[in-house]
């Protein structure tokens, strides 16, 4: 019996159809093998194109109207103070410099990975340090230099803010020296943001980030800002204390994570230059006098601007293991810690 050979090469008309879809901006999916021929990718690959379109199956394509152009990461460091307001040990019980280095390293790694998906975004790293030893400053700068990212390292001069900060807190008691230096550091970070062009990520030196943190934040920012037609604020951490009461929220879809509306954060957050300028008075008021809670001015801003955090978390806050302001739920903390090792 003569064998009939199967000449099932890609059909001419199929190729033409794919080309037409690609030209017109449509995506088609082969649901037999989950391949997207118009993009030449599997559906498990990144289908979104930064600054152009966000693709999530089965929702399809969302045109990006809010394009991220740059991100300044302003890291506040202080390797000389173990804990700002507590006497308890942090998770893993290491010296503070270890958290500082791992935090910076995790951010640098995440930026470098992000550049693969966001080649047109300009990244800059700014470090504002207070009272770290010369030895630790050398370690910090050496680590950043190795990344080949654009950076600046500033030594905080607390005396520059003597006339700007009220030494008496909201309870009419004297603020601690550590708290005053923290307020000065935040103030300096805000002043540095005046020269920023687009997104600004204000972050403390005890937040360890997942490798995909920066990329997810950028993809999600573009998608959600394009959807809502407004600027927004992001916190990378899913704080456990946010689950201690039942309250209404909104849920958004990012690139690989869900994001939910939150009304409170600590002092690590991302916002646009537009929001910084619009709420300059509130932001600087957080540094001029110690509030209770400290972040009250931020929370007032969140009443007017959308603030969101990821589920699950993109970063862990390395406080004591029993702290409600620390370790995020449903995250492999040890894995994140190990991946940030210098």
Image (cartoon, grey):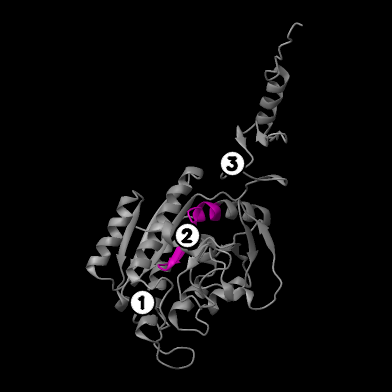
Q: Residue furthest front?
A: 1
> Crowding at label 2, few (<14), some or many (≥20) Cα neighbours within 10 Å?
few
Quarter occupied by residue 318: bottom left
Badge number at residue 82: 1
> Which disc, if any, is residue 45?
3
210 left or right, relative to 301: left
Q: Residues within 10 Å of mark 3 (few under 14, many from 20)?
A: few
Q: Does residue 97 appear left or right of residue 85 in this picture?
A: left
Q: Which residues are magenta?
A: 199-218
| Residue 267 image point, x, y percent | 48, 72
Mark earlier in primary sequence (3, 1): 3
| Dot 2 or dot 1, earlier in sequence | 1
Q: Which residue is mark 2?
A: 335
Report helix, strand or loop for mark 1.
Answer: loop
Who is closer to the viewer here, 225 or 21?
A: 21
Eye-nearest disc, 2 or 1: 2
Q: Quadrant of residue 27?
A: top right
Measure the alpha-carbon separation of dots 2 and 1: 23 Å
Eye-nearest disc, 3 or 2: 2
Pick the residue in front: 120 or 15.
Answer: 15
Location of the C terminus (image quadrant): bottom left
């Amino acid at each position: 019996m003569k064998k009939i050979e199967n000449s099932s090469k890609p059909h001419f008309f199929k190729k033409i159809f794919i080309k037409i879809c690609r030209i017109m901006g449509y995506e088609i999916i082969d649901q037999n093998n989950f391949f997207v021929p118009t993009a030449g990718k599997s559906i498990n690959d990144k289908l979104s194109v930064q600054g152009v379109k966000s693709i999530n199956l089965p929702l399809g394509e969302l045109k990006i109207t809010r394009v991220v152009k740059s991100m300044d990461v302003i890291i506040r460091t202080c390797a000389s103070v173990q804990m700002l307001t507590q006497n308890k040990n942090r998770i893993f019980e290491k010296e503070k410099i270890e958290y500082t280095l791992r935090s910076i390293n995790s951010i640098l790694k995440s930026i470098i990975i992000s550049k693969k998906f966001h080649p047109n975004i300009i990244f800059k790293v700014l470090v504002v340090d207070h009272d770290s030893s010369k030895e630790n400053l050398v370690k910090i700068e050496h680590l950043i230099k190795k990344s080949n990212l654009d950076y600046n390292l500033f030594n905080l001069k607390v005396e520059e803010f003597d006339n700007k900060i009220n030494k008496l807190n909201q309870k009419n008691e004297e603020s601690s020296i550590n708290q005053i230096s923290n307020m000065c550091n935040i103030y300096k970070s805000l002043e540095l943001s005046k020269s920023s062009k687009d997104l600004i990520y204000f972050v403390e030196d005890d937040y360890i980030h997942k490798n995909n943190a920066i990329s997810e934040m950028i993809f999600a920012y573009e998608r959600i800002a394009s959807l809502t037609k407004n600027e927004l604020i992001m916190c990378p951490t899913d704080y456990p204390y946010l689950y201690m009461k039942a309250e209404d929220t909104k849920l958004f879809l990012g690139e690989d994570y869900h994001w939910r509306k939150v009304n409170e954060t600590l002092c690590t957050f991302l916002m646009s230059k537009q929001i910084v300028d619009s709420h300059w008075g509130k932001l600087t008021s957080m540094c001029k006098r110690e509030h209770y809670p400290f972040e009250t001015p931020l929370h007032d801003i969140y009443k007017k601007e959308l603030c969101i955090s990821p589920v699950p978390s993109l970063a862990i806050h390395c406080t004591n293991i029993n702290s409600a302001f620390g370790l995020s739920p449903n995250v492999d903390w040890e894995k994140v810690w190990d991946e940030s090792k210098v």
